[in-house]
């Protein structure tokens, strides 16, 4: 898909909508906020109607816009003065997957971003570096630190399954 032409707006929403919500959720840790951020990202896409070289450029633009909007959301006055309600819907994951997801959610934002982009979206360190405006070596260091933190956090959680 990366060498193909950029998608029309309706198709872009269908193809990239879940990715944008997941990326936002990975940063803000709240499904409703992630859905709001995704909506704002796609509204910006409609309003600005940027020209894309290809599908990869369009996908990268959507991820960058999602990251920027999520950062703005996290630093907003609203976030500093609100209290979350408990999410009452069950997650569609196994208990083991929930343990790993919770551990990833507890990572600092800079580590959550690179873990999501690398392991979920499949980007390389160089591509992540371009998206997040960091050097590839910084991305590799952050991935290594994130793995080390996850290993320490999850130590002993899955020992009986080996």
Image (cartoon, grey):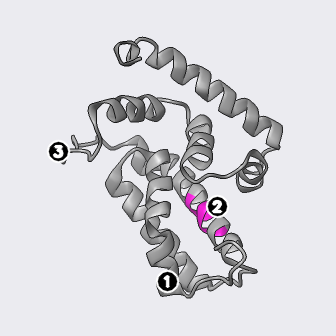
Q: Where does the N terminus fall, quadrant-wise?
A: bottom right
* Mark 3 residue element: loop
> Does the segment drawn in magenta span residue 64?
yes
Which percent across, then down, holds residue 122?
62, 52
Numbered circles on residues, count? 3
Q: Residue at x 74, y 45 (%)?
A: 125
Dot 1 or dot 2: first in sequence order is 1
Instruction: Measure how far apart labels 3 and 2 are at the Cα level.
Output: 30 Å
Could you classify mark 3 by the number of other residues whose Cα lies within 10 Å: few (under 14), some (14-19), or many (20 or more)? few
Q: Which residue is mark 2?
A: 64
Q: Is residue 5 magenta?
A: no
Report x, y in % for residue 39: 43, 70
Front position in the image: 86 or 63: 63
Q: Which range of residues does the magenta coloring cover? A: 61-66
Which residue position holds label 3? 88
Residue pointed to by mark 1: 11
Q: Residue at x 63, y 42 (%)?
A: 114
Q: Secondary structure at mark 2?
A: helix
């Amino acid at each position: 898909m990366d060498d193909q032409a950029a998608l029309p707006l309706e198709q872009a929403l269908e193809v990239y909508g879940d990715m944008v919500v997941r990326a936002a959720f990975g940063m803000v840790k709240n499904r409703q906020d992630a859905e709001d951020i995704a909506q704002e990202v796609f509204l910006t896409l409609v309003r600005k109607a940027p020209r894309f070289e290809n599908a990869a450029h369009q996908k990268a633009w959507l991820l960058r816009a999602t990251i920027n909007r999520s950062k703005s959301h996290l630093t907003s006055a609203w976030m500093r003065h609100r209290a979350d309600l408990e999410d009452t819907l069950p997650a569609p994951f196994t208990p083991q997957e929930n343990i790993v997801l919770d551990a990833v959610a507890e990572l600092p934002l800079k580590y959550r971003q690179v873990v999501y982009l690398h392991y979920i979206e499949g980007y390389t360190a160089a591509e992540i570096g371009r998206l997040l405006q960091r050097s590839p070596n910084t991305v590799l260091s952050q991935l290594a630190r994130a793995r080390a933190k996850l290993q320490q956090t999850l130590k002993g959680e899955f020992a009986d399954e080996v």
